[in-house]
Image: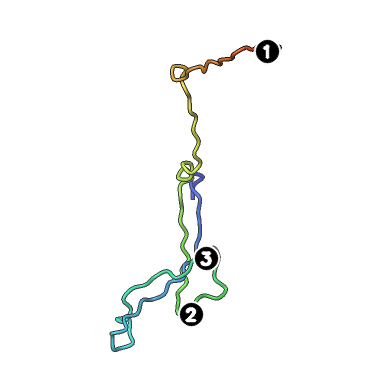
């Protein structure tokens, strides 16, 4: 791991997808697998019939920078218009 990357670890609980139509109890009955749970640390009580797999991913730190959106919006003077203030004066003695 370099100074430009970070690591994240996840524990996956993987369950087999069993082909119920196969007649014999062998690896041929397993048609696939699916992740049924994930945790940050090893599960205290994994689901029955699952295999726990530790997976560590290494990600460049720069990949996270776009997640901090920042923008500077400059409004040019040519796009602004002053709003004139119109006031009608009245004599305070008039009713």
Give the mark nearest the N terminus, 1 or 2: 2
Give the mark nearest the N terminus, 1 or 3: 3
Label 2 CA crowd tier, 10 Å (few <14, some 14–19, many 20+)? few
Q: Marks 3 and 2, Cα distance to the nearest angstrom?
A: 16 Å
> Considering the numbered disc 2 on the image, is that residue within a helix, a strand or a loop?
loop
Vertical relation: 69 (above or below) 84 = below
Label 3 CA crowd tier, 10 Å (few <14, some 14–19, many 20+)? few
Whether residue 20 sits left or right of residue 37 in the image: it is left
Which quadrant is the C terminus positioned in? top right
Which residue appears farthest toward the front when viewing the image?
Answer: 95
> Considering the numbered disc 3 on the image, is that residue within a helix, a strand or a loop?
strand
Q: Marks 1 and 3, Cα distance to the nearest angstrom?
A: 80 Å
Vertical relation: 8 (above or below) 86 = below
Front in this rendered view, residue 74 or 6: 74
**Residue at x 47%, y 23% (from the top left corner):** 75
In terms of image quadrants, where is residue 34? bottom left
Q: Which residue is mark 3?
A: 39
Give the mark nearest the N terminus, 3 or 2: 3
Disc assigned to residue 32: none
Q: Position of residue 27 (x, y in %)?
A: 32, 81
Q: Does the CB distance between marks 1 and 3 fall below 8 Å?
A: no
Q: Which residue is mark 1?
A: 94
**Residue at x 48%, y 44% (from the top left corner):** 67
Q: Position of residue 88 (x, y in %)?
A: 59, 13
Q: Which residue is mark 2?
A: 48
Which of pointers 1 and 3 indicates the residue nearer the eye?
Answer: 1
**Residue at x 33%, y 85% (from the top left corner):** 26
Q: Does the CB distance between marks 3 and 2 fall below 8 Å?
A: no
């Amino acid at each position: 791991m370099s100074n430009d990357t970070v690591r994240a670890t996840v524990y996956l609980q993987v369950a087999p997808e069993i082909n119920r139509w196969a007649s014999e109890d062998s690896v041929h009955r397993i048609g696939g697998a699916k992740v049924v749970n994930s945790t940050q640390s090893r599960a205290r009580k994994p689901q029955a019939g699952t295999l726990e797999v530790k997976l560590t991913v290494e990600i460049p730190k720069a990949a996270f920078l776009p997640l901090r959106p920042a923008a500077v919006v400059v409004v040019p003077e040519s796009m602004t218009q002053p709003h004139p203030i119109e006031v009608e004066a009245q004599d305070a003695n008039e009713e």
